[in-house]
Amino acid sequence: MKTLLAIVALTLGLALTTQCLAHHSYVAEFNADNPATIEGVVKEVWFKNPHIRYYITVTGEDGEEVVWDVRGLSPVKLVRQGWNKKTIKVGDRIKVYGHSGRTNKTILSIIEITLPDGSILSSRSVTYDITDDKK
């Protein structure tokens, strides 16, 4: 019986350890010193853990379309701020302000989103915001 309990405890410990190690570093992926603003049409909504994502088609000055991977906080944090999976829908034209990716030029971490009606959503809580920069 003690052996069985030890095996169960070890298995749970290993499972929890891998979950902790799986999370990434914000500064390794995004550059807080390089904010950017993009505007485009929502192609796909991914409102699930670990972080919400919107895939946005942005048309460049050259007329070429590029799909941006726009990422936010976890759904539970955003729901507490009034968001839900229908707040932003496929086909919506939105403007996103955020921190650009370090190695990928088409990735953005959401700070603010301007909706089609002009209202602004924030993706950062006061304790989570790592800069005071503004557009």
Image: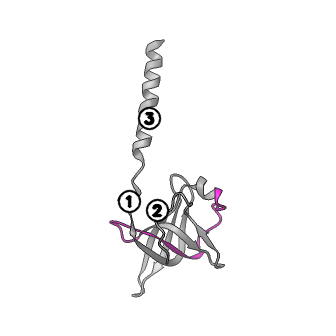
Residue identified by numbered label 3? 15
Q: Give the range drawn in magenta.
A: 80-107
CA–CA distance between discs 1 and 3?
26 Å
Seen in the picture, residue 41 relative to 126 is either above or below; the reply is: below
Is residue 102 covered in magenta?
yes
Residue identified by numbered label 1? 27
Query: Label 1 is placed on what type of residue?
Result: Val
Neighbor class of circle 1 (other Cα within 10 Å; few <14, some 14-19, many 20+) is: few
Residue at left 45%, top 36%?
Answer: 16
Q: Nearer the viewer, mark 2 or mark 1?
A: 2
CA–CA distance between discs 2 and 1?
10 Å
Q: Return the disc, 2 or 3, that comes first in the chain's sequence.
A: 3
SS at mark 1 in the image: helix
Q: How many callouts does the rendering have?
A: 3
Examine the residues drawn in magenta and state their main secondary structure: loop
Give the label on residue 130, or none: 2
Which percent across, then down, holds residue 53? 51, 62
Splitting the image into 4 quarters, where does residue 92 fall?
Answer: bottom right
